[in-house]
């Protein structure tokens, strides 16, 4: 996961206001070197299993975590295409629930 490792700020989500995205902490994705990561937005916190394309600057991921302060298990999948090394656009799917487009920007390299 060479190019994507680090913490990425969610700057926009299609379904929720930025205040809602940042409800518990700044909405973000964090990608680690071991094809894993973490996401946080609204009341959701989840852990990622990431697959990076070696032909195009994009990744797909599945995730599992909790919603509403750890009271409800949630899971899903998603995809991110990277326009530049500092900007990505993606789509997040919540299993049996909502789906939302989003934009992320690199905050810090790990």
Image: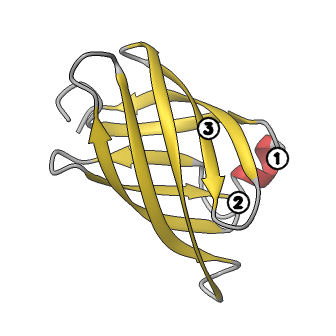
What distance separates the C-alpha of mark 1 from that of mark 2? 8 Å
Reading the image, the residue beneath label 2 is 42
Of callouts 3 and 1, the N-terminal one: 1
Q: Where is residue 11 drawn, in percent x and y? A: 65, 32
Position of residue 12 relative to residue 28, above or below, is above
Left or right: residue 15 compared with residue 38:
right
- Residue 107 higher or lower than 25, as above or below: above
In the picture provided, is 73 more to the left or to the right than 39? right
88 to 42, vertically: above or below: above
Q: In this view, does 67 lie to the left or right of 52?
A: right
Residue shown at 79% from the left, 53% from the top = 20
Which residue does the numbered mark 1 point to in the structure image? Answer: 16
What residue sits 20% from the left and 35% below the top? Answer: 1
* 10 Å crowding of disc 3: few (<14), some (14-19), many (20+): some
* CB within 8 Å, label 1 to label 2: yes
Locate the C terminus and report the quarter of the image it occupies. top left
Q: Mark 3 points at which residue?
A: 91
Per the image, label 3 sits on a secondary structure element best described as strand
C-alpha span from label 3 to label 1:
13 Å
On the picture, is 43 further left or further right than 48? right
In the rendered image, residue 17, in percent from the top left (x then y), is placed at: 84, 43
Of 69 and 63, nearer the camera is 63
Give the residue furthest to the top.
84
Q: Comparing marks 3 and 1, which lies closer to the viewer?
A: 3
Mark 1 / mark 2, whichever is N-terminal: 1
Which residue is rendered at x = 16% and y = 45% of the image? 33
Name the outermost residue toward the bottom.
71
- Looking at marks 2 and 3 on the same chain, the residue that comes earlier in the sequence is marked by 2
Element on which disc 2 rests: loop
Disc 2 to disc 3, how far (Cα)?
A: 16 Å
């Amino acid at each position: 996961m060479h190019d994507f490792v680090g913490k990425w700020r969610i700057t926009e989500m299609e379904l929720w206001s930025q205040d809602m995205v940042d409800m518990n902490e700044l909405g973000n994705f964090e990608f680690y070197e071991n094809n894993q990561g973490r996401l946080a937005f609204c009341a959701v916190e989840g852990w990622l299993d990431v697959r990076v394309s070696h032909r195009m600057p994009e990744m797909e991921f599945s995730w599992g975590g909790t919603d509403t302060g750890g009271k409800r298990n949630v899971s899903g999948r998603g995809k991110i295409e990277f326009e530049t090394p500092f900007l990505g656009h993606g789509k997040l799917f919540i299993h049996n629930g909502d789906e939302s487009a989003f934009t992320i920007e690199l905050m810090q390299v790990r």
